Image: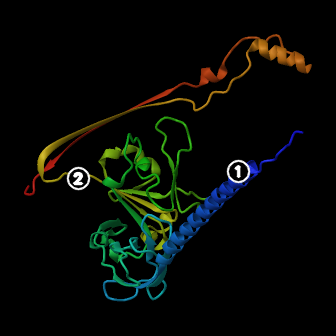
Amino acid sequence: MKHGYTTHAPARWSATGQLARSASFTGAVLHRVLLSAFCMLMALGAFAQERVITGTVKDANGEGLPGASVYIKGTTRGTVTDFDGKFSLNARDGETIVIQSIGYLSQEVLLAGQSTLDLQLQDDIQRLEEIVVVGYGTQQKKDLTGSLTSLKAEDFNPGPITNPLQQINGRAAGVTINQVGGEPGQRPNIRIRGITSLDGGNDPLVVVDGIQGELDLLNQIPPSEIESIDILKDASATAIYGSRGAAGVVLVTTKKGKAGATTVDYSAVFSFETVAKEYDVLDAAAWRAEAARRGVPADADFGANTDWFDLISRGGFTHTHNLGIGGGEQQF
């Protein structure tokens, strides 16, 4: 008689393997839970470092400065001081707070545990004492109440310039300069604070070294000979010119001789203008085929391949050469 037997060792081995896999799975889950908890604690710690920073911004006389910009350097987080010069802003240690206001020197403060800031901005003496040209002479910028923009030679747009207005394009707020035509050498169009009249002219008055004229007067001045351009915008600034300054005034001051050695300056600009886009048109054969397809009688006389657009247009060349000689003596 054969006797059979059954061994349970594989079952024990299988249970042991399941226990090992279960322990491995539990360890992996526990590892992930601990890692997530650690990341949350780190995030909470970083969040806890951010706090509310309050402060006051004052001018040179110790008075509250309203409307000053207060922001975190390198970020888009910021605020503006209220009527009393007070502000409140969320920030962290190590960040830099920047305070700016028109007519004052900007100031930066590195946060290192402070919760309250008491700041005082100093006057920007250089900008306030800057001399600008107005209708009745010159004045310091700090004494002016009208709206104007003053641009010096160092503020002009770089590159090849053929018209003085191109030098200030995009440099003055409220001033729009557009090229309305494609004729070589044609002056741009300028509007100061939009259109001021429906029936009358909207071109501003141009005054070059005290001589009044129209915008075409600027085409007669080499851009390299201009020292500064002042743009008068509102009624108080243009009042001395009466109705002629209703659309604004552009004051141009040209360069003058200075004491010192004689200097010779030469500049040249060569420009070439072409049609921005040429449209593809049908030739004679394609025209007749399209006319036949649409059932339109084609005139046999119109069979020549004449490119009329090419006949009436061509590229434009412009040469601009400027030669200037300057010098002078203090005693003459």
- Determine the CA span between mark 1 and mark 2: 103 Å
Sort mark 2 into few (<14), some (14-19) or many (20+) by Cα contacts within 10 Å. Answer: few
Q: Quadrant of residue 280?
A: top right
Residue identifier under label 1: 13
Residue 112 shown left or right of residue 197 in the figure: left
Residue plotted at (28% across, 72% down): 129
Residue occupying the far front of the picture:
1
Residue 98 on image: x %, y %:
39, 72
Q: Residue at x 58, y 25 (%)?
A: 313
In the image, what residue type sits under mark 2? Lys
Number of numbered discs = 2
Q: In which quadrant will I find the N terminus? A: top right
Is residue 16 positioned above or below 305 on the image? below
Q: Earlier in the sequence, mark 1 or mark 2?
A: 1
Task: Tell me which residue sits at (38%, 44%) in the image.
Answer: 220
Residue 332 at x, y = what percent? 8, 55
Closest to the observer, 7 or 83: 7
Answer with left or right where residue 104 lies relative to residue 244: left
The residue drawn where x is 47% and y is 69% is 242
Residue 58 lies, with reference to residue 22, above or below; the image says: below
Identify which amino acid the numbered label 1 is placed on: Trp
Residue 152 placement, left or right of 71: left
Within the image, what quadrant is residue 325 found in?
top left
